Image: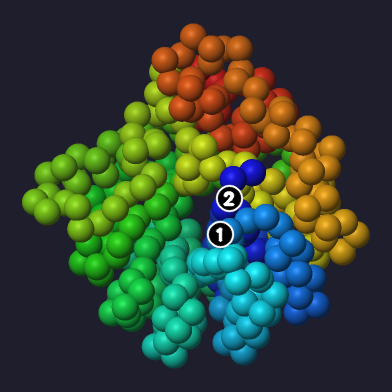
Amino acid sequence: MSEQIQLLIKSGTVCNLACVYCGDEVSGPINRMQLSTLIELAGQLASLSKSSIVVAWHGGEPLTAGQSFFIRATEILQSHLKPNQKVLTCVHTNGLLLNESWMALFESIQAAVSISLDGPGEFNDRYRRSKDGNGSFKKTMAALHIAAESDIGVSVSATVHDDSWRIASDLLDICRSQKVNQLHFEPRLHRGSLRMVRSVSVEAFYQFVRALDVTRSGVKNNTDIELPTLGDWSSPGEGQPASCMFCRELCFSNLAIDWLGDVYPCDLFHGNASMCIGNIHTKSLSKILTGDMYRLYKLSASVIPSICRSCPWAEICCGGCPYHRYMAFGTFERPSLYCSRAL
Ligand code: SF4
Ligand code: SF4
Ligand code: SF4
């Protein structure tokens, strides 16, 4: 693992939306991370030899925990970490509860804020809506506006669906009009099942990426918004990199921990018991990271599938995201299901 660790905290299963593709068990029992688990985690993070610790708060909807939880959580992390350890906070939210007061809190801790939005009005609301069927677009836009006015700015995360290519340029226009810093995107996935199936075709994903690229190239001053994922996904298909929303090289710097203290190599594996590499209440993080389960995972996930060895992109792509390989095919020996060699 590098000097940096990126830890995604799955803070619970409580959410004020019920998106049709949600993989975060928001309709099941209510779970929240307890402060005792966070205190245990903070102490264990302090004992790792990491100078930079990125803590990303994630779903259900982290803001449902309330501001007092975030204030306490920040105090706990800061008070446990060593002076030479820097903590960077990211909050991934659907934006429904976000207001000036939340943004003031995030500004005070210099947190990065990312808001989910899949596209314009009706398109977004087809997927991202409440239990009662009410769309989230209007409230999300209000949140984007508030966040964009702050000193820390805001990024957008979009889930790509089979028909997202139709609205790619509208999505980019919305982000630009709201002064969004970055647009991230990832294909819609079926998560939590034994096998992952592709819910957006390679072709449809390619069309989305192309549409974004073309729109962006046609705009003057097109550097006002970054598209970090674009470089990774710009040409999916045989002989092209198949990456993920994270930088592929940083894959083994990522970990996810849920409200129970269960640790996974990546958030995407959450819910698959066989991919749980330990629990911080029974084993310390440093032991989990040097333990057999994680070593075996890294060894297996580092193997470049034999079919990829003749690919000119193998060195940077390495067969693609381990999740897109293992959860689709039950083996790391196949290339990403977002590469045409996997078809
Ligand atoms: S906002 Fe996120 S956690 Fe909530 S229902 Fe939608 S996808 Fe799930
Ligand atoms: S998954 Fe394999 S074949 Fe496909 S682009 Fe990556 S290295 Fe090449
Ligand atoms: S498993 Fe995939 S999504 Fe997760 S960190 Fe690794 S490359 Fe990224």
Labels 1 and 2 touching (C-beta < 8 A): yes
- Residue depicted at x 33% and y 71%: 153
Drawn side of residue 111 relative to residue 81, left or right: left
Drawn side of residue 98 relative to residue 41, left or right: left
Residue at numbered disc 1: 52
Residue at numbered disc 2: 3
Does the closest atom of ligand 3 sit within 8 Å of the Cβ of label 2? no
Quadrant in which residue 251 is drawn: top right
Drawn side of residue 65 relative to residue 299, left or right: left
Residue 307: where, in percent of width, then height?
Answer: 56, 12
Of all residues, the one furthest to the left in this rendering is 220
- Residue depicted at x 62% and y 89%: 68
Of all residues, the one furthest to the top in this rendering is 310
| Mark pair 1, 2: CA separation | 6 Å
- Residue depicted at x 30% and y 74%: 148
Drawn side of residue 4 relative to residue 296, left or right: left
Residue 297 visible in the current orientation: yes
337 relative to 34, above or below: above
Judging depth in this view, the residue of 230 and 142 nearest the camera is: 230
Closer to the chain start, of discs 1 and 2, is 2
